[in-house]
Amino acid sequence: MSKNDQNKPMIHLLDPRFIWEIGEVLTLGAKKYGVNNWRGLDPNRILSALYRHLLKYHAGSKIDEESGRNHMIHIACNAMFLYYLDQRSEKID
């Protein structure tokens, strides 16, 4: 059987655990702050959060004390938020 999918994204290459953990962190955030509240945040606040997680990770801390999740997952969530806002043409000052 033939399937014309050679030009489609190879979604199976994504790490399922990474995607799952992003969902877990987003769920924690939704419970704490409200669903999709980040869409209304100042992009600079999101960038600051990303940097804080990156600096903690760089200093040797793998796990965020508040959430109990890996700092890299928080970084990924913040990167997604910034990407979303960038696509909506909201610029960082």
Image (cartoon, grey):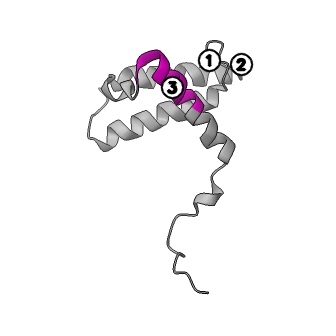
User: Residue 61: which numbered mark, if any?
Assistant: 2
Q: Residue at x 32, y 29 (%)?
A: 92
- Which mark is first along the chain, 3 or 2? 3
Disc 1 crowd rating (10 Å Cα; few below 14, some 14-19, many 20+) is few
| Residue hosting label 1 | 67
Cα separation, mark 3 vs mark 1, equals: 15 Å
Image spot of residue 47 (x, y percent): 44, 25
Disc 2, disc 3: CB below 8 Å?
Answer: no
- Which mark is first along the chain, 1 or 3? 3
Q: Residue at x 32, y 44 (%)?
A: 87
Please state the extent of the stretch shown in magenta in the rendering.
Answer: 24-34
Q: Amino acid at mark 2?
A: Ser
| Residue hosting label 3 | 50
| 26 within the magenta span | yes
- Which mark is first along the chain, 2 or 1? 2
Q: Amino acid at mark 1?
A: Ser
Q: Quadrant of the C terminus?
A: top left
Q: Amino acid at mark 3?
A: Leu
Q: Nearer the viewer, residue 22 or 74?
A: 22
Disc 2 crowd rating (10 Å Cα; few below 14, some 14-19, many 20+) is some
| 16 within the magenta span | no
Q: Quadrant of the N terminus?
A: bottom right
Asked if residue 57 lies left or right of residue 41, the reply is right
